[in-house]
Amino acid sequence: MRGKLILIGLVLLFIMVGCAPKTHFGVRDKALWVPAEFEQTEAAIASAERSEGAKYCPEKIARAKELGKQAAEIYWICRTAEAMSLLSQARGLAKEAESCRPAAMVTPPPQPPQALAPAAPAPAARQPISFHSVLFDFDKSNLKPEAMVELDRAVKIMRDNPDVMLELQGNTDNVGTEAYNQALGKRRADAVFNYMEAKGIDPNRLKQVSFGEGKPVASNATDAGRAQNRRVELFIVK
């Protein structure tokens, strides 16, 4: 009898484990159940990838995937509310991507018969905009030369697109206390803010925020992973 109970238990465990999803956004699940928001977000991103808008706003879909991965990573360290917020942002971006269309082409009015000047060409369709993160050395908030190169590119993009507004998101690795890393993330966001303002960008188009150690994009268990987490992300809010 005892042997039959053990066999039944093993069969049930095999069914439960075999049917349970193993990962979400590439992050391995640590339990058999996860909130429905994960599958909803993955479905929203998959729908966006199949839509016509994927051709025009690939950066929104890429950002949605990145937010989904971050949500999965911090959900398993018990930051549930923040994970749900990131998933909500990811679904919003996926919905925006589905609606993306090329910029309208403006046809110049016909010239009168006596006009010899050629018609002005229609303006080119607006290209997708994307920004790259800038990285920092351990426990530092000063900008490295390669960070300045990327920020100069960002400044040019903002000059060419005066309607764009950015959120400068400061992040750290997990070395040190949570309070210290929160302050360090703020100093890094401030460094990027000050640089871009000095280059002529209106400070009203920039907003600083610090996530401290709360939004890793790589494992803090390795030097390489921690180096990727010491960053400021330039996130388009408008």
Image: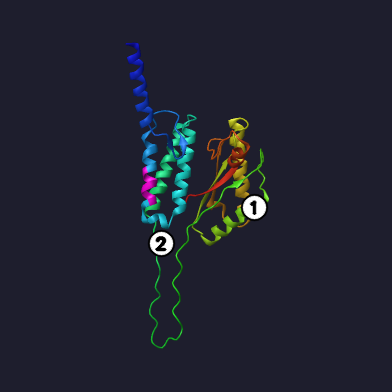
Query: Can the viewer see residue 149?
Result: yes
Badge 1 is on which residue?
A: 148
Compared to residue 72, the image places residue 5 above or below, namely above
Badge 2 is on which residue?
A: 102
To which quarter of the image does residue 106 belong? bottom left
Residue at horizontal 42 percent and vertical 48 percent from the top:
93
Disc 2 crowd, CA 10 A, few/some/many (<14, 14-19, 20+): some
Q: Nearer the viewer, residue 180 or 32?
A: 32
> At which x and y percent is residue 105?
40, 68
Disc 2 secondary structure class: loop
> At which x and y percent is residue 155?
58, 57
Tell me the magenta residue range: 43-49
Disc 1 secondary structure class: helix
What coloring was used for the rendering? Answer: rainbow
Residue at horizontal 36 percent and vertical 48 percent from the top:
47
Q: Quadrant of the N terminus?
A: top left
- Mark 2 → mark 1, Cα distance in angstroms: 31 Å
Disc 1 crowd, CA 10 A, few/some/many (<14, 14-19, 20+): some
> At which x and y percent is residue 207?
54, 47
To which quarter of the image does residue 174 belong? top right
Q: Nearer the viewer, residue 32 or 170?
A: 32
> At which x and y percent is residue 92?
40, 46
- Does the magenta portion include 232? no
Q: Mark 2 or mark 1: which comes first in sequence?
A: 2
What secondary structure predominates along the stretch shown in magenta?
A: helix
Residue at horizontal 34 percent and vertical 27 percent from the top:
15
Q: Which mark is residue 214?
A: none
Q: Amino acid at mark 1?
A: Met
Q: Residue furthest bottom?
A: 114
Q: Amino acid at mark 2?
A: Pro
Asked whether the beta carbons under mark 2 and mark 1 sit within 8 Å of each other, the answer is no
